[in-house]
Every structure is written in C-alpha cells, then in structure tokens.
Image (spheres, rainbow, N blue to C red):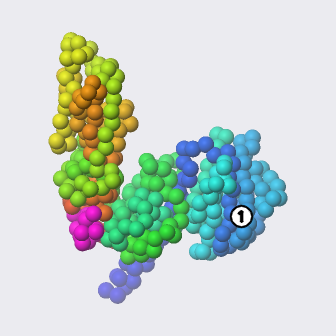
Amino acid sequence: MKVFFLVLSLVTNVIYAQHSDLRVGLYYGKSVQQLVVENVSGLFEVNIDSCVLDTIQAKCISKFQVDNGKVRFQLNGNKIGLYDTVSFRRLEDSCIFRLGTNDFKSNLRKFCGGVRIWNTGGNLTVVNDVKLDSYIAGVVEAESGIGRHLEYYKVQAIISRTYALSHKRKHKGVDICDQVDCQVYHGLSEKDSNITLAVAETKKMVLVDGDIQLVSAVFHSNCGGQTCNSEDVWSQPLNYLRSVRDPFCSHGINSNWQKIINKREWIRYLRKNVPDRFRPAAPLADFPIDYDQKIRRLNYTNAGYPLPLKKIRADWKLKSSFFSVQEIGGGVVLKGKGFGHGVGLCQEGAMEMAELGYGYTDIFKFYYPEVHLIDLDTIEFYRLEW
C-alpha cells in the first residue's frame, strides 16, 4: 500500500507539472509593430534563434521592431541584430518584466515568467510563458476587479483554471490568448491580496462533469435575473449549463440597460431580416412593435417570423439578448436586462451570494448543476490505465 501511494504521488506530481506552465498569447489578434521589455526583477536567459546570447538582470531594457520578415532586437540601446525569434527565459521564480507595445511609454504592464517574440506576417507575436497559478491570479483580477469577497475570488479562480485547461491550444501556437474570446488577462495581479490567497487556497481545484471531463466553465457579467441554456446561445446542450432563475444579480450595475432606436430604422431592419414570404403587408405605421420578454426566449416573433434574439443583439451591439421592445413617442425603446451571453455563472450574482455568506461550493451548485469539484491530479490519475 505504501508503494502504491508513493507511485501515485510521483505520477500526480508529474501530471501537475505538465499543466503548471501556459503559453499565453499577448495582444492577440492586434497589430503590434514595436515592443519594449523592461526587466524588473530576477535573472533571465536571452535566446536568439535558439542560441543562448547572454543572461540579464533587472533594469535591462530591450526594444523590438518588425523588419523585413524578422525581429529587430536592441538591448540597452545596443543594436543586436535581426532574428526569427527572441526569447527571455526565466531562470528564477522571481522573474518579472514590464511590457509595452507601439505607444509603450503609456501602457507598460507587469508580467511574471518569460516572454518570446517573433514576426508573423508583419506583426510581432508575443507569448508569455507563465506559471498556471500566476496566470489565474491575473485573470481573476482582470475579469473581476478588486475589493471582492474572498469566497467570490475562489469561485472565479476555479472556473478560470478550469476554463484555461479545457480550452488549451484554442489558438495556433499558444495555449490560450489574453482577449475576451478566451479570458481577459492583463498580467501580474498585485492590487488585492485576497486574489493571491484565493488562488493558493484553491490550488489544483477544477470542475468536471459526470465523465470526469473538464467542463466548459463559461461565465458572464450579469444574467438579468435568468441564465440561459447552452443551446440557446451555442449549438450543444450541456447538462451543467441549464437556465436558472437568479434573484441575486438584480441590483448589479449591469442588471438593466436601455437603447432608443428610430422607429423607421427598426422596421427597415426587421423587414430586411425577415424572408419575403413572411414579411407582413401592413404599412410601417401599423407594424407591431411592443414585445414583452418576461422570461428569456430565443426569438423575436412580432415580425411574423422567428428572428433570433442573439442576432438582434449582435447586429445592434446590445448588452444582452434579454430585452423587451416598446414604442414610446414615435421611437422604439429596447429595455434590457443583464450583460453578456447569459450562460453559466453570473458574476454579479455570484458576488452578491458571496457577500450574503454563501460559500464558494454553494455558488457552484447554484450556477453549475451536475458538476463536481475535484483536484486536477485526481482527474489524470483516474484516466491512467493501471
């Protein structure tokens, strides 16, 4: 039995090490022509095209620029040359650097770990090699802000860890990116000690389904009082992403919104998006306007055709698809609830639950039915064939 647990410990430690580092694409999808890297602390090894150039410490400043399909590299004002790839590999856990893009004097941000830079089609590709928990802390701060309850930060840490690991290699050449289509990541978290504490106290914790598979732990800002089923927004129904009535987010800053549209513009839009055979023959003045969405629905039906509400949301850049329509004074008023796609965890609702004394496991059970909270190493152990 002692041998069994020794083997288990060795195996799980190796498994966690496989997940402990992430390749995060920074400024992903954006045009970056110039870059500056300022070493703040720790010892870095500088590599150019896979060859070791030197080791550098704090206060070293490097500049990079696209140049004829390669990367022009300067170090402390000295021109080093043109290369395919330049990387700073961390040699100590204390390695921190500041990073800025084209207008780097005004937007330097701190990051942990190392960084790699190469030229892709005339733009700099920037990748942060960072420990998983440092990345998670950065995501929690970027997605949640500071001054939240510790129990809420635990929730956000676990779902962010689960999301990152379940969406690894979503983009070519990196594990995950720093944009909203993955998770927002602005670098080092250092503004609220509770964030670091929450990440440490939930270390290795992830959410899985009944088949011990990492769930798609999606979240949004505010559901407006009712979350969505996964298939209402995307194609696949998932048993842990079910619509729930949420009384906790009603006082959140994103709980209500309003947009006023010219009536003729609204009618033109509807006529344009309704197939010819469904278009009503009534004149514009008689076109039905009022639409009351008391509970979340999939389609706007006033035009005699089921027009998806998520399409209306995208076309009009609305905060959510949970809105009612009313004609007021010759205009069309869209009165909406919530902010985001509405699937999974409602952040403002979860924040309120934490303030009311709910623990992080209670919050999970409310927003994600049929999920299990387990240690990351346990997942991999049960997948091994003994």
Q: Is residue 253 visible?
A: yes
Q: Is residue 299 above or below residue 355?
A: above
- x 39%, y 72%: residue: 198
**Image location (x, y in percent) of residue 29:** 54, 44
Residue type at mark 1?
Val
The residue positioned 56% from the left and 53% from the top of the image is 26
Give the total number of marks visible in the rendering: 1
Which residue reaches farthest front?
A: 329
Give the quadrant of residue 321: top left
Query: Between 359 and 356, which is closer to the camera in this rendering?
Result: 356
- What is the x, y in percent for residue 155? 33, 66
In the image, farthest residue toward the bottom: 2
For residue 213, say whether it is visible.
Answer: no
Q: Position of residue 381 (x, y in %)?
A: 35, 70
Q: Residue at x 49, y 57 (%)?
A: 185
Q: Magenta span has 353?
A: yes
Check disc 1 and report its element: helix, strand or loop.
Answer: strand
Q: Classify the position of the C terminus by image quarter.
A: bottom left
Rendered location of residue 57, percent (x, y)? 71, 72
Main structural element of the magenta stretch: helix, strand or loop?
helix
Q: Give the quadrant of residue 73.
A: bottom right
Q: Nearer the viewer, residue 11 or 111?
A: 111
Q: Residue at x 29, y 19 (%)?
A: 271
Residue 293 magenta: no
Disc 1: which residue? 46
What are the residue bounds of the magenta stretch?
352-365
Q: Tell me: 12 left or right of 311.
A: right
User: Quick one: label 1, few (<14), some, or many (20+) residues within 10 Å?
Assistant: many
Q: Specify the quadrant that holds the N terminus.
A: bottom left
